[in-house]
Amino acid sequence: MGLFFSRDEVLWLIQYHENPPARQTKYRFQEDLIDRFLPELLFLMEECRALVRKYGQVIQRYYVQYLSIYDAVALNKSMQSLTHISEEDSIILSSSAKPFLTSLLGRLRTQTTSSTFGGSDLTGRGYRAKLLPLGVTSDKLHPKHCAALIAQVVNKKKRGKSLKIMFDKELPGSESYRKTREDLTTMDKLHMASTELCYSINYTPTIN
């Protein structure tokens, strides 16, 4: 789970570094993407990956032997206690609880069958370093919402530059904007840099 969250953090930085949202001020958005903890995060990700590869058999034994037995029993009991679903959905859920090793396919089938709206992809394909039309305010990019903004621009040209344009505060992309994590003084930065340098030197027995 830690690798999953760290992957999302790195992909978020890559996505908005390649496609920064439009800003009204002259402030550079790239400065918000400078994360001084990113090298440490990548370092810890590599350590976690090494541990997963080293103890891969132990992790596989846990998911194959432990979860396939105990979680399947608990899941089957939970399915039997559901009374507000139809008989067809109950059969689908019961059938997906028995083969627990293929639970991902069962969830996809259950979602696409019982949902009235539609199914969504449960894989990591949605994490791309491109602009995604999945934001909360992405609907405001449609032409039906541009008339008010166009009218404001036209009125400014007619009345002069003294009239300020009142843009919408919630522009597309604002839900993903983040500020600096913390304010550090110069001594704090030097202390953190020296600490990271000492840790990196003592991490390996030899330095080539």
Image (spheres, rainbow, N blue to C red):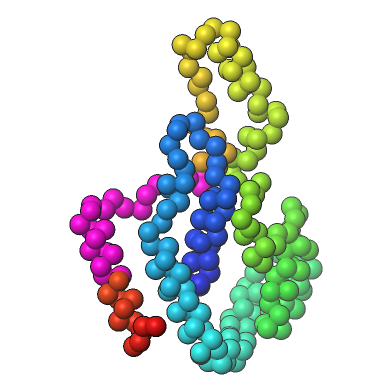
Q: Is residue 157 left or right of residue 6?
A: right
Q: In this picture, is 185 found above or below 37? A: above
Q: Is residue 25 visible?
A: yes
Whole-percent x and y of residue 182? 31, 53
- Residue at 62% across / 59% down in the picture? 127
Question: Who's the residue at 58% across and 86% down the image?
Answer: 63
* Vertical relation: 57 (above or below) 98: below
Q: Residue furthest top?
A: 159
40 sits left or right of 76 in the view: left
Q: Which residues are magenta?
A: 175-196
- Reply yes or no: does residue 62 show up in magenta: no
Task: Give x and y (percent) for residue 133.
Answer: 66, 46
The image quadrant of residue 110 is bottom right
Q: Is residue 190 magenta?
A: yes
**Hey, which quadrant is residue 85 in on the image?**
bottom right
Position in image of residue 189 (x %, y %): 26, 58
Q: Residue at x 37, y 59 (%)?
A: 36
Label count reads 0
Outermost residue on the front side: it is 208
Residue 194 is left or right of residue 30, and the answer is left
